[in-house]
Amino acid sequence: MLHGGFALTGVGTVLLGCILPQVSSQWHLRDKDAGLLLLVQFATSASGALLVRRDLWKTLGWGYGLFGAGALSIFLLQHNSFSLFVLAFAGYGLGLGMAMTSTNMLFGRRYPKRRGAALALLNFSWSAGAVACPLIVAQFLRRSSSGSAFGLLGLAVLPFVLLPIFADPPAFAAETGLKPAPTGSRETATIGYFALLAFLYVGIEATVGNWMSTYATRATTWNLVGSSVAVASFWAALLLGRAMTPAVLSFVSERRLYRVCVVIVLGGISLLLTAHSPRTILAGSVITGLALAPLFPLILSLFLAEIGESRNAGWVFAVAGLGGAVLSWLTGVISTDTGSLRIALLVPGAAALLMLGLIAWRRANRNPEPPTDGQQKPIPEHTLEPTISGKS
């Protein structure tokens, strides 16, 4: 049931990006204004993450309640003032943030010995919803308005408000496996580092996913159906990559996989920037999605392993949501000011470069070199190699 609800949060996260051309046309929005809707959704989602504290089941129920009510409000207010429309997106995003953060933390605490694998599979469910969304929307919009898609999603989400009633909280609390939280400057530094990584990752994923449909229609001769294929290809590649991640990590080190994937993300975005044909758009979408797939579960697993039982863990999820808000909005602003969405997509490319620089900096400053004598040695706390499958 947790996986099913999480799949719906995947649908909810990408739905606006899928129908952004229709929403922009309905409200006569510039890219800058359309980016404001993305900013509101992701900023309030970040705020929702900060509301998640000790009682994860309570915040899970409240999150699905706000998520579903917000989706229904978007449907009901689609022909009213734009201000009310934006307000509905605020409630929608707040619920998304609470539901996603609560679920991630429940899984992270329940499976301490295979945290990375559990989180990878959980995010596989999220990706499944994200993949299905553009394909369903492309068919749905042939007969209904864009707002109706939110109404249908709201009806599907509301039953998950009752999820805590059917849950077995003691089973999820029986084996936390978390060490005591770090204190003082160490806690601040740990949260700051992982918050920045999460900010950049979510910003890249959200920007590429949300602007893909609009970019595909402008860069090629595709209509809405064709551009939906590009969006679906991106999320399908992310889905496939997350399904493959546990197997890949059995023979490739996490640090190496991280570095390689960030470099490939740069290549995929570069391919999108040079694309003038549907085939190149599809190739760039698939490459970028596959390369992004392992990064978030890896970042999240390591963070939960280092931060222990800290009450401030929600800050990383909050800042991650802000990454989706800020970079998506910034892309829209640059697109409007330059008249080119192609130039604006340099934003996620620059974010990927910064991610690569951060991991190189931390490795150089805090990690010792790996052993060369073939002997097993303890893994330092600050290495970017969490135990994914329960084996060191």
Image (tube, rainbow, N blue to C red):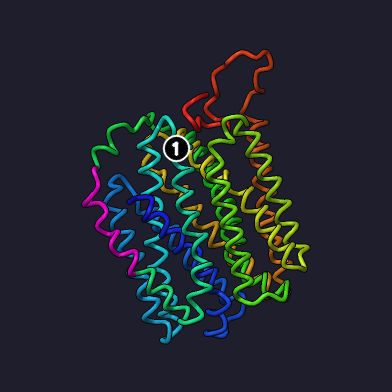
- Relative to residue 324, is residue 76 drawn left or right? left
Between residue 106 and residue 154, name the one nearer to us.
Answer: 154
Q: Which residue: 36% across, 81% down?
A: 76
- Relative to residue 334, is residue 181 drawn left or right? left
- Relative to residue 271, is residue 162 drawn left or right? left
Identify the residue position indicated by label 1 in the image: 304
Question: Is 359 one of the magenta-colored residues?
Answer: no
Main secondary-structure element of the magenta-colored stretch: helix
Between residue 342 and residue 113, name the one nearer to us.
Answer: 113
Between residue 283 and residue 86, name the one nearer to us.
Answer: 283
Q: Kindly indicate the quadrant of the structure image that contains residue 211.
A: bottom right
Q: Is residue 369 above or below residue 220?
A: above
Where does residue 336 sit, x and y in percent of width and height? 67, 75
Where does residue 281 sit, x and y in percent of width and height? 71, 63
Q: Residues within 10 Å of mark 1 (few under 14, many from 20)?
A: many
Q: For numbered disc 1, what is the local secondary structure? A: helix
Where does residue 6 sit, x and y in percent of width and height? 40, 54
Q: Amino acid at mark 1?
A: Leu
* Magenta span of residues: 155-168
Between residue 41 and residue 257, name the one nearer to us.
Answer: 257
Q: Residue furthest left?
A: 165
Question: Is 163 one of the magenta-colored residues?
Answer: yes
Where does residue 21 sit, x and y in percent of width and height? 58, 77
Q: Which residue: 42% across, 78% down?
A: 148
Q: Which residue: 61% across, 13% down?
A: 375
